[in-house]
Amino acid sequence: MAAESWNILDLIAESGEETIQEMISYFSCDKVVDGKAKNLNPDIEHFLKENAIQFAKEKKSITYLVGDAEIGEVLGYFTLAHKAVVIPANGLSKTMLKRMSRYATLNSENNTFTVSGFLIAQFGKNYAVEGGSLITGKELMHLAQNELLELQHRAGGGLVYLDCEADARLINFYEQEGFRLFGERISQKDGKRYLQYMKFI
């Protein structure tokens, strides 16, 4: 199987919004754990079904559906955006400080960089297809990074960042993918604590 990523706007232009909406309606983060269905990430599922198309049409963010043309199912997805983020200079290595200075100027008053970076806003597998076994998180990230490299080639930039819940499984995954913790934030929407990770591409 060779998984591919498809820009949701291209899919809508080709097949129509109703067709794509129906396609993503089968996406689920429900995974059977100890004989019971558990939703691993309701926010990931909700975003795809309720916001992905509208956000793409408004150019707030672009969602990429991931699948195999032969299977014809959505195996996962990721959403990319371009947004500014504040990175504290404290704790950055000399190498990272040097790289950061290529993209931003240090604010000496608060010792932070404000950087325009690529945000991986959403990232998840579809457990409704073979229990999510047809694609790994690593494969999904590889496809996301391929899209980011293409964006970098066309528009420049080099910083990628994301937020994740303080979950050991997620932390381990992102750190293995080369992301480095730089801060945390509290969501104004739900009060959840999110860890902030970054890497250079």
Image (tube, rainbow, N blue to C red):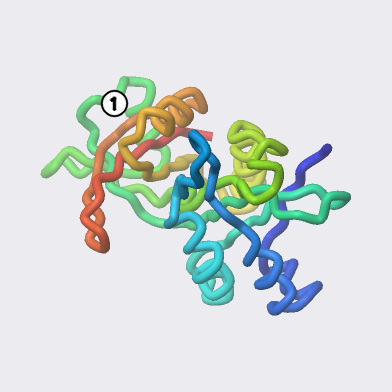
Which residue is painted at 57% across and 51% down in the image?
78
- Residue 171 visible in the displayed image: yes
Left or right: 148 as drawn, with respect to 83? right
Front residue (pair 35, 110): 35
Residue 142 position (above or below residue 27): above
Whole-percent x, y for residue 150 in the image:
66, 47
Q: Residue furthest right?
A: 70
Q: Residue 74: name its quadrant.
A: bottom right
Front residue (pair 23, 116): 23
What residue sits right under mark 1 in the picture?
A: 92
Front residue (pair 107, 43): 43
Q: Quadrant of the C terminus?
A: top right
- Residue 118 visible in the displayed image: no
Which residue is painted at 67% across and 56% down in the image?
65
Which residue is painted at 59% across and 35% down in the image?
137
Which residue is painted at 49% across and 48% down in the image?
120
Q: Residue furthest left?
A: 109
Residue 163 position (above or below residue 9): above
Q: Badge 1 local density, few (<14 within 10 Å), some, or many (20+)?
A: some
Left or right: 7 as drawn, with respect to 167? right
Q: Residue furthest front?
A: 35
Left or right: 47 as drawn, with respect to 23? left
Badge 1 element: loop
Whole-percent x, y for residue 93 in the image:
31, 21
Whole-percent x, y for residue 110 in the image:
13, 43
Residue 45 position (above or below residue 54): above
Front residue (pair 137, 86): 137
Whole-percent x, y for residue 183 in the image:
26, 38
**Tag 1: amino acid:** Leu
Q: Quadrant of the N terminus?
A: top right
